[in-house]
Image (cartoon, rainbow, N blue to C red):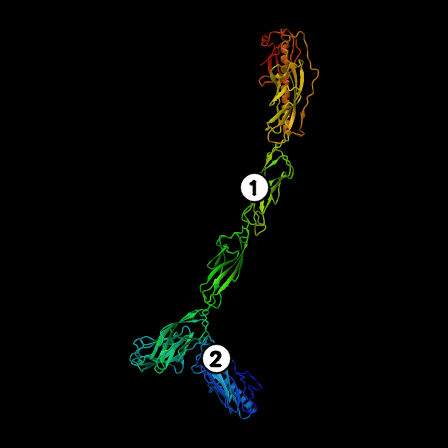
Amino acid sequence: MWPGPKAERRDSDCVYGSMRMGASSLNHLFLTDLHSLPWFINVSESQGPGTILQSFSFNCSSHTPTLELLHVQPPTTFFNPPSLTRWQGIYVGKVGSWAQLGTMGEQGQTLNSQSQRWHRGMESLGPTGHCLLPQMTLSSSARLDALTVNHYELQLRFTCGNHVMEGPLSVDVQRDPGHIQCAGRFASPAGEIIQVPETVKPGARLYTLLLPGQGAQMSITSAQDPPYFPGPFSINGQGWLQAPSQGLKGQAQKVFQLQILVNFGQGRSCCGMLTVKVLPAPSSQVSFLQQAQNITIPENLVPGSKVVQVQARGFDVRYEILSPVPCRLFSIGRVDGVVRTTSPLELAQAPDAAVTRLRVKAFERLRPWASAELDFKVDVQSVNRWPPRCTPALLATQIPETMPVGTVLNTFTCTDPDSPGSTLDYQLLFHSPAGAASLCLQDRVLEVNATLDCDTPGACFHHAASILVLDGGQPLMTTEVPVLVMVTPVNEFAPACVPRTFRVREDAGPHALLGSVVGKDMDYPHDSIEYSTPGGSATFAVDRLSGEVRLLGPLDYELQKFHRLTVLLTDHSQDQDPTCHRSGSCTITIEVEDVNDHAPECEPPFQELTVHTHLGRSMEVTRVSCRVPQEPQRLAFSYSIVGGNSWSQFSLQGAVLVLNDLMLGPSWPEQPHTYEILIRVADAGPSTPHLSTTATVIVHLVPWRASTVATSTHRATVTSMMTPLLVTDTEAFWQPEPWFVVVLTVTSALLLLALGWLLSRLLWGLAQVLQVPSKPTQALLLNSIQGTEGSVEGFMEAPRMETPQAPSSVMSLHFDGRAQDPRTGRDYLFNTHTGARRWL
């Protein structure tokens, strides 16, 4: 390594330093430690031969110094060896040609002034000082091309007596877009000399001219007339120099000089000389020891790495690459035949480096026409150093659960830095929930699958997965792209309930529970429903959360048996949008069960009857007619005698009161007797409770004396009437409807008219009876007796004249009177002696 600068004293532009080697060497060595030597030099590719690259100075005392160029990497002859020169009585070191120092114009003047200052500085060191001015210049063969080689490393050695130092000097070739020049030795003043055997085939490629740029045209301008030329040489568009179509057979030892013109356009051109020397057919055979083969190397080889070594049989064999020319990736050792890399083989930056077909030529140095060629292929294998890179590197998205099947969520774009354009393998891995199928991966596309649903507890809401991307390299490299898909709920279904029927007793109290409305909703969370009744109801209420139906007001079976209640169901908390609701409804039927809250009513509530008894025979007294006005459909009643039947001479057959004369014994009184019979009438059937009322029937029993003839007239009168007694065991209060009052009033008026008409008919009938002269003046008012129904209505017996008894058979057939029943209005004939009647 070059030591760092260690300046002690600066005199103008020349710096002097010293390095102590001991007391005896103090006057022998004074050395500036590379004061003006740069570590890096930038030079344009447009610089030609003789160009001074850089100037630097040394100082050495009592010795003649030397400066050597040890080697150049990559090898080239573009740089002249450095030299040391004495200037104006002192030693001046120079690298390259120093002849131009005095004719360099401004630069020469600068150097001249520098040398004068160095001379003045040297005088201070004594007559033995040597101020050296080395310079690096380009040689006559220099053809810099930044596209071919843009960096050279020069190793320099400086010797001053026993002190030796080495150091690198880096030269960077800068690209000059406006510089176009001819490349190759043919453009040098000496030109290019090639040797070809006379056995080459007609039209064969002899030489490849390096084209300086696109669009350059090359042509041979020198004369090629016979007999000096067997035929014209030619150059094609690729810069190949081709043998004449007649071949070169018989042209051995001849030399053909070709002047070549390269035209770049816009008036720019260059020319060069190419000499073709024809050699006789080789007398010895050069051959390669190995056959054609394929070489595989990794792409991570550094420049200069050995690829393969080829060996050929022959005398003093040399090697060169015939194809491709120029070969930017590989070079071959001219002597050892070792093929090495000359630049990085990164396939990502240089995909064409994957396969290179090399043609190597081996030839004898003294007889170049004695040669052999070897073709082999170099395969650059990708080295898997980097995992795939994906876009996006993370996917986090939110989708509704109603997203259609097949919807594309994202398309992943991944590339392999080691092998761009290679095919990658994509795999979908589920983490939570494990094994879910809500998402699917089609090649690089992540899509919604058919099973995306959030209406099952824990079914989705979020899916944690990853996309595993694998390349095909060795070793296998993978990249995992995290995927988080948030599935938001959507209110898809409207709530619904099944119509139901509730039964309730009409005497149920307030807040009684009738039942519950059960709503169903398929959205998650399930059955998140609120209940309500549109418009409200004064009789029933529905609990908002539980759906329980309760009673608010009283019920009346007689007014309304069925109630229909519409229940509205509204869901909530089932959508990402809290304001999104769905609703449904169903009808609830409430059936009111009848409860006996009205006692039966009998019409009339009491009756007073006069019955003529016949010994040994039973007879119907009357029929009790009862009903419930508020519930006309109720017709089942039970009847029982609860009072006034002390001798058990009365019984009931259903609603009919029957007098049982068979039970009368000899002690039966012969005088009329009055009975007050209390009949309890109760409703029957499954309804409870059973309410009842009591009907009163007053029966005047008049014994019938058929064998007694009255001799005097006796009038039996009822001196007093018993007050009717109505007994009931119900406390219910009845307030009729207005329409019922109107109907009852109209019915009562009609009934009064009918009674008035019947009374007039009765009076008319009595008048007719009184007008008959042959009849006894008797009037008998009887109560109506219904023969067709088998019942006896009560009647009043009028006073009558007792007459001698006539034979019963004759008297029963004679009706001497006519009358009208005041109750029914029917006319009848009667016998004043026997009381027998015949209805008309």
Question: What residue sits right under mark 1 in the picture?
Answer: 586
Q: Locate the C terminus by quadrant.
A: top right
Q: Secondary structure at mark 2?
A: strand
The residue lying toward the viewer, choosing from 159 and 123, is: 159
**Vertical relation: 429 (above or below) 3:** above
The residue lying toward the viewer, choosing from 488 and 677, is: 677
Label 2 to label 1: alpha-carbon separation: 95 Å
Relative to residue 201, is residue 341 drawn left or right? right
Q: Residue at x 69, y 19 (%)?
A: 722
Pick whichever of labels 2 and 1 is earlier in the sequence: 2
**Vertical relation: 808 (above or below) 645:** above
Q: Position of residue 768 (x, y in %)?
A: 62, 11
Asked whether residue 749 appears in the rendered view, the answer is yes
Which quadrant holds residue 619? top right
Relative to residue 781, is residue 209 drawn left or right? left
Label ID, residue 524: none
Question: Residue extending furthest bottom?
Answer: 127
Question: Residue extending furthest right?
Answer: 719
Q: Position of residue 130 (x, y in %)?
A: 52, 90
The amino acid type of the residue labelled 2 equals Glu
Which of discs 2 and 1 lies nearer the camera? The answer is: 1
Question: What residue sits right under mark 2 in the picture?
Answer: 153
Q: Dot 2, how many residues are within 10 Å of its Cα: few (below 14), some (14-19), or many (20+)? A: some
Q: Secondary structure at mark 1?
A: strand
**How many badges with numbers are in the image?**
2
Q: Position of residue 834 (x, y in %)?
A: 62, 10
The residue lying toward the viewer, choosing from 184 and 359, is: 359
